[in-house]
Image (cartoon, grey):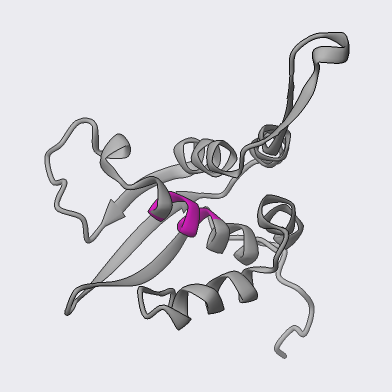
Amino acid sequence: MESKGFPLNVPDVVQIVMKIRVQEKLYELVHCFRKPTAEDIKECQRRLNKTEGIGRECRGIFDPGESAEFLWNACIEKVEGYDITDVKDWKIRVPLEHKQWAVERLILWLGQEQILIDMHGITLTDFISNFNSTNYADFG
């Protein structure tokens, strides 16, 4: 009998597949993540909103880029579809916007969309719709 409940056994490796069109060529890019730990998610949320300064000079800093890059760097196992074979520094060669897109899909897949709403003020569905409407990215 097939279970109708939410699966609690998240696989150890999550693959996020993105299709990105550059000019007339379509590229399929794969980001393979290990399952983020609770600490990874907490650190990602902490990095979204930071404070800087002392006393009255204290101000809030909203940095979704740093937050997404942290989670990507913490959990990425490998990428496919990039021209970075045999490169020791492959993690820094992946474009930041690709890291952000992959992390946003990972967050949705894990059921943590609230993080994305905090990062951008919109749902992932709306975010992806905006990219698809420009014909630049298709997250399949």
Question: Measured along the vertical axis of the image, is residue 85 above or below residue 54?
Answer: below
Front-lying residue, 50 or 10: 50
Question: Measured along the vertical axis of the image, is residue 20 above or below residue 55?
Answer: below
What span is in magenta? 98-103
Q: Residue at x 65, y 41 (%)?
A: 37
Image quarter for residue 121? bottom right
Where does the image place residue 111, in percent across and percent down from the top left?
A: 71, 64
Q: Quadrant of the C terminus?
A: bottom left
- Give the dominant element type of the magenta stretch: helix, strand or loop: helix
Q: Residue at x 59, y 39 (%)?
A: 67
Where does the image place residue 52, in percent across and percent down from the top left?
A: 72, 18
Where does the image place residue 28, in percent across and percent down from the top left?
A: 27, 70
Front-lying residue, 80 or 35: 80
Image quarter for residue 76? top left
Where does the image place residue 51, in percent across and percent down from the top left?
A: 75, 23
Front-lying residue, 20 or 133: 133
Question: Measured along the vertical axis of the image, is residue 83 above or below residue 131?
Answer: above
65 on left or right of 43: left
Q: Residue at x 49, y 52 (%)?
A: 100
Instruction: Say if residue 60 shows up in the picture.
Output: yes
Residue sticking out furthest to the top: 54
Any magenta on residue 18? no
Q: Quadrant of the N terminus?
A: bottom right
2 on left or right of 104: right
Instruction: Say if residue 13 shows up in the picture.
Output: no
Residue sticking out furthest to the right: 56
129 on left or right of 138: right
Question: Measured along the vertical axis of the image, is residue 134 above or below residue 45?
Answer: below
